[in-house]
């Protein structure tokens, strides 16, 4: 049986579905007996959601879009003699 | 615009080359770049913590990617391919500026042998005595800018796995490939990033008066 310290270490890996089966089962067995870790698991879910929601990608600045289009325009143009 | 000198060999060598899949139809590079530009820029902003630097990093990334386009065999992996190139370009830029991206394990949190637990700190300090949702109320204190500021203070090597997995939704395996480290290393950095995030949120809340604690010296 793993302790709370080990359960907390595995918590985010569990949420990432990165725990191998045996380690996930040990983690889940711990949750069945530990209300505190159940609470922290739920909190971790909310924390991750908060970070993901608040890290909204900023809008691409117009100037950058123009630079990129100029760059891509050059890549779009067929090389002389290829067509 | 800052002129960017790019070594073609450097852009290719650091990014894993995919196994050839000759039956997959190749998309023009411009289409790939346009499709992923928004997310690529968002990633670069989080990497550099500076919108102006991010613009140059996007341009650097696209120049490198254009030259290495032959390496992209599977269109479905275009985003992770671009992110890997951006990560390498960011590392090179940090190095050239004398700002080496820290890769050696660093954990100021474990100075006393104990890892900080935000969950526990909130429970002990109980900043909202009448709340039925104590921990959620703590998270609700943070505005977008607050979270960005805390995020930006995380050690870059530990911040990147958080950005890739939590913000951009890559699996840890994909994130490990993008960063170019073994899965175990990625998981370890993710854990450290998480702990720095937890500590950062708590310290930020205390320092900015979002909460008042009974004895901050104990933290």
Image (cartoon, rainbow, N blue to C red):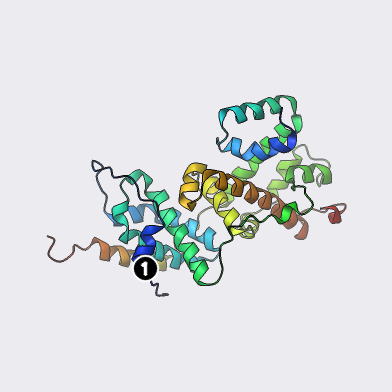
Residue B121 vertical position relative to residue A18 in the rendered view, above or below: below
- Taking the spot 47% from the left edge, 52% from the top edge, the residue there is B180
For mark 1, name the chain.
B
B15 with respect to B21 (left or right): right
Residue A4 vertical position relative to residue B98 in the rendered view, above or below: above
According to the picture, the residue beneath numbered tag 1 turns out to be B7
B187 with respect to B201 (left or right): left
- In percent of width and height, residue B28 lies at 26, 53
The quadrant holding residue A80 is: bottom left
Would residue B216 be seen by someone viewing this image from the given angle?
A: yes
Would residue B171 be seen by someone viewing this image from the given angle?
A: no
- Taking the spot 77% from the left edge, 42% from the top edge, the residue there is B120
- In percent of width and height, residue A68 lies at 36, 64
Q: Secondary structure at mark 1?
A: loop
Q: Pick out the residue farthest to the right.
A: B214
| Mark 1 residue crowding within 10 angstroms, few (<14) / some (14–19) / many (20+) | few
Near-viewer residue (A22 or A72): A22
């Amino acid at each position: 049986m793993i302790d709370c310290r080990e359960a907390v270490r595995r918590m985010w890996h569990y949420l990432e579905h990165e725990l191998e089966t045996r380690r996930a089962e040990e983690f889940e067995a711990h949750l069945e007996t530990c209300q505190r870790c159940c609470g922290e698991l739920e909190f971790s879910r909310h924390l991750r959601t908060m970070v993901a929601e608040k890290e909204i990608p900023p809008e691409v600045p117009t100037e950058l879009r123009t630079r990129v289009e100029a760059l891509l325009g050059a890549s779009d143009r067929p090389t002389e003699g290829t067509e | 615009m800052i002129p960017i000198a790019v070594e073609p060999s450097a852009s290719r060598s650091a990014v894993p080359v995919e196994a050839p899949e000759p039956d997959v139809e190749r998309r023009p590079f411009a289409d790939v770049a346009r499709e992923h530009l928004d997310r690529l820029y968002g990633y670069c902003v989080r990497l550099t913590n500076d919108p102006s630097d991010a613009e140059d990093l996007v341009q650097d990334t696209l120049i490198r990617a254009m030259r290495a386009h032959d390496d992209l065999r599977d269109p479905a992996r275009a985003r992770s391919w671009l992110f890997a190139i951006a990560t390498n370009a960011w590392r090179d830029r940090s190095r050239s500026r004398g700002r080496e991206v820290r890769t050696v394990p660093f954990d100021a949190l474990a100075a006393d042998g104990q890892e900080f637990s935000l969950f526990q700190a909130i429970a002990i300090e109980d900043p909202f005595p009448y709340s039925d949702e104590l921990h959620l109320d703590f998270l609700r204190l943070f505005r977008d800018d607050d979270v960005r500021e805390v995020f930006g203070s995380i050690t870059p090597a530990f911040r990147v796995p958080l950005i890739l997995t939590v913000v951009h939704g890559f699996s840890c395996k994909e994130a490990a490939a993008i960063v170019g480290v073994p899965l175990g290393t990625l998981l370890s950095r993710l854990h450290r990033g998480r702990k720095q995030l937890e500590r950062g949120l708590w310290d930020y809340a205390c320092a900015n008066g979002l909460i008042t604690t009974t004895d901050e010296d104990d933290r």
